[in-house]
Image: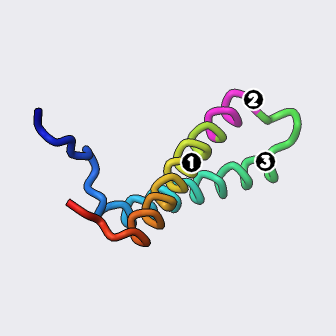
């Protein structure tokens, strides 16, 4: 049986963290601007739910990779 290798190289975790959190912050800002500039008559619940879903996915995976960066950065990686 061959040894398991991760589909994502741990050396890429810091870059993934920055990219995913940046995308999450962009959609968070978009959601905030949408909520502030729209009236209660022009708001669309489906658009709000879609943007919030995208925000939660990108931010959640960004934080997950951030935790993995901390974990793999503090413990020596042994082969």
Q: Which residue is mark 1?
A: 60
Residue ID at (69%, 49%): 31
Q: Which residue is mark 2?
A: 45
Neighbour tally class for label 1: few under 14, some 14-19, many 20 plus, Cα within 10 Å? some
Residue 5 drawn at (x, y percent): 21, 45
Judge depth for marks 1 and 2 and give the one in front.
1
Secondary element at tag 2: helix
Secondary element at tag 1: helix
Splitting the image into 4 quarters, where does residue 25 fall?
bottom right
Q: Which residue is mark 3?
A: 35
Asked if residue 51 lies left or right of residue 44, the reply is: left
- Which of the marked residues, 1 or 3, is nearer the chain's N terminus? 3
Farthest-out residue, top: 46
- For the magenta stretch, what is the residue range? 44-51
Quarter containing the C terminus: bottom left
- Which of the marked residues, 1 or 2, is nearer the chain's N terminus? 2
Residue at mark 1 to residue at mark 2: CA–CA distance:
22 Å
């Amino acid at each position: 049986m061959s040894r398991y290798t991760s589909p994502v190289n741990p050396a890429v975790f810091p870059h993934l963290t920055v990219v995913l959190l940046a995308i999450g912050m962009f959609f968070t800002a978009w959601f905030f601007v949408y909520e502030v500039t729209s009236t209660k008559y022009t708001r669309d619940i489906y658009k709000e739910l879609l943007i919030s879903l995208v925000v939660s996915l990108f931010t959640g995976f960004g934080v997950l990779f951030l935790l993995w960066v901390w974990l793999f950065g503090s413990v020596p990686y042994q082969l």
